[in-house]
Image (cartoon, rainbow, N blue to C red):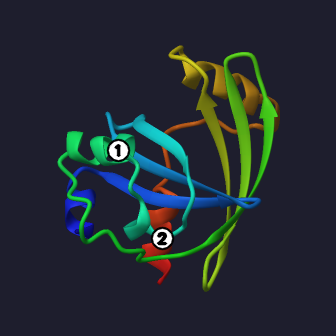
Amino acid sequence: MRQKVKQKNGAVRIRIVDDRYIFTLKIRKDAITHFEYEKEVNTQDLLNIKDEEILTWLKTHDIPFHGLIPIVSFTTKRYEKDLERATLCADITQYDHHVDYELEYEYKYEHNGISYFNQILKPIHLQYIKNCPSKIARAFDKS
């Protein structure tokens, strides 16, 4: 099952925010962007998800629902700043054996986000070049 999601350059997760469970399916659109589907669910157990919309997302991307099992786990603290065109997110992620830091520019709608993100980074002498591996990929690399 993991291989099917990996072939799609995707990820399936359930994020716990406060006391809420948020299912996410990410599928790579191109080298920079992903399709991202999110919906609140009433469980953190993938096998107990019965939501038809979520099952349709998986079917649309040819990902069989049966066999989905958690492989890695990590905790992220997120700090957000709402901007006109996007949300700027600063993440601190604790894995089993290391901590990492990430700054994300999450689009609210399609626009030249790289240019805007680089304008934000310019005062601290940084420039966006390409996306780093995902948190899930980094968790596998360090496990």
Q: Could you tell me which residue is drawn at 58 percent across and 36 percent down?
A: 128
Please tell me in which quadrant of the rendered image residue 76 appears. bottom right
Q: Could you tell me which residue is drawn at 50 percent across and 53 percent down?
A: 23
Residue 114 on image: x %, y %: 56, 25
Residue 86 position (above or below residue 9): above
Q: Which mark is residue 52?
A: 1
Mark 1 burial class by Cα count in 10 Å: few <14, some 14-19, many 20+: few
Q: Nearer the viewer, residue 28 or 133?
A: 28
Residue 49 on image: x %, y %: 42, 60
Q: Nearer the viewer, residue 72 or 56?
A: 56
Q: Amino acid at mark 1?
A: Glu
Residue 4 on image: x %, y %: 20, 60
Q: Nearer the viewer, residue 48 or 130?
A: 48
Q: Which mark is residue 38?
A: none
In the picture, which quadrant includes the N terminus? Answer: bottom left
Mark 2 burial class by Cα count in 10 Å: few <14, some 14-19, many 20+: few
Mark 2 vs 1: CB contact within 8 A: no
Q: Which residue is mark 2?
A: 45
Q: Secondary structure at mark 1?
A: helix
Q: Amino acid at mark 2?
A: Asp
For marks 2 and 1, the one nearer the N-term is: 2
Q: Secondary structure at mark 2?
A: loop
Q: Is residue 90 left or right of residue 37?
A: right
Residue 14 position (above or below residue 110): below
Q: Could you tell me which residue is drawn at 72 percent across and 35 percent down?
A: 88
